[in-house]
Image (tube, rainbow, N blue to C red):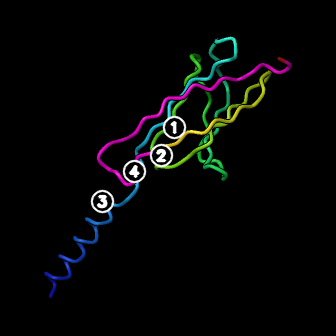
Amino acid sequence: MQGLSLLWTLAVLLLLSVTAPAQNNTLRGKVRSTSGTTVNNAIVELKSLGGGMIAQTVTRNDGDFAFSNLATGEYEVEVTVAGYDSTVQVARFNTPYRMEFAEVINIEVMIRPRGE
């Protein structure tokens, strides 16, 4: 009887590991002004689409930012920095229910100086 219970438990665990959504995706990006120069120290917020904030970071000197360990789905990326209009861009991971590989999305966010 214990053998059957152990076998059942292993089967359920195996099934859950196969059907669980991937949470190893990465979103990388670069923030540039409309003139093409990179923007450092911009606040980048990652939000669930239509929902709350998931994470926040600040761009480095080269305008780069990254978020990792993300599940499959849609996200909003909002960029805010003094002297520029805030910008929102949508990113989508399209690899549902796959654990064997990670998806990496690279985006470029263009922000406009205020008054331009």
Q: CA distance from mark 2 to mark 3?
A: 17 Å
Tag 2: amino acid = Leu
Pointers 2 and 3 in contact (CB under 8 A)?
Answer: no
Instruction: Find residue 23 and name its label.
Output: none
Q: Residue at x 16, y 82 (%)?
A: 4
Of the numbered discs 2 and 3, the one sitting upstream in the chain is 3
Mostly what secondary structure, the magenta segment?
A: loop
Q: Which residue is mark 4?
A: 22
x and y percent of residue 71 in the render? Answer: 46, 49
Q: Nearer the viewer, mark 4 or mark 1?
A: 4
- The answer to if 107 sits in the magenta stretch is yes
| Residue 84 placement, left or right of 52 | right
Q: Which residue is mark 2?
A: 70
Q: Which residue is mark 1?
A: 67
Q: Decide: few, some or many residues near mark 1? Use Cα within 10 Å; few <14, some 14-19, many ≥20.
A: some
Q: Which residues are magenta?
A: 93-115
Of the numbered discs 4 and 2, the one sitting upstream in the chain is 4
Q: Which residue is mark 3?
A: 18
Pointers 4 and 1 in contact (CB under 8 A)?
Answer: no
Q: Residue at x 64, y 48 (%)?
A: 53
Q: Nearer the viewer, mark 2 or mark 3?
A: 3
Q: Residue at x 73, y 26 (%)?
A: 81
Q: Nearer the viewer, mark 3 or mark 1?
A: 3
